[in-house]
Amino acid sequence: MITKLMSKTLKVLMAIAIRAKGDPKCKFTSLAHLLTEDFLKECFRELKRGKSPGIDGVTVGEYAKKLDANIADLVARLKAKQYNPQPVMRV
């Protein structure tokens, strides 16, 4: 289910994608302001349950146990530019 918050953010992301495709030389300095705690919680709720753990070994259920703290930590690291994403596991 897409909420109003998610819909608004997705519209902004779509507008960015259209602009980037139309003007390949356009540079975006920061999109981090779109990654709010509320938006990330909505994204988390859309994840498929019952899948295998990620490359870090954490399952959706384990992450959910401390969801508010995990999301707050993630947003803080994003704002401080200290977030380093882990590699994606190929399937």
Image: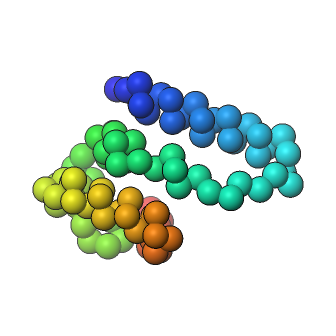
Instruction: Determine the residue positioned at 32% across, 73% down.
Output: 56
Looking at the image, residue 24 sits to the left or right of residue 9; the answer is: right
Looking at the image, residue 82 sits to the left or right of residue 60; the answer is: right
Confirm whether residue 43 shows in the render: no
Instruction: Determine the residue positioned at 26% across, 71% down.
Output: 57
Instruction: Determine the residue positioned at 60% across, 40% down.
Output: 13
Residue sitting farthest toward the left: 65
- Asked whether 60 or 79 is in front, the reply is 79
Q: Does residue 13 lie above or below 55 as drawn?
A: above
Residue 72, image x, y percentages = 29, 58
Confirm whether residue 3 shows in the render: yes
Looking at the image, residue 28 sits to the left or right of residue 56; the answer is: right
Instruction: Determine the residue positioned at 41% across, 25% down.
Output: 4
Residue 59, image x, y percentages = 23, 61
Residue 7, image x, y percentages = 47, 28
- The scheme the figure's colours follow is rainbow
Looking at the image, residue 67 sits to the left or right of residue 13; the answer is: left
Where on the picture, by quarter, is residue 61?
Answer: bottom left
Q: How many marks?
A: 0
Q: In which quarter of the image is the C terminus?
A: bottom left
Q: Quadrant of the N terminus?
A: top left
Residue 89, image x, y percentages = 44, 68
Q: Does residue 33 lie above or below 10 as drawn?
A: below
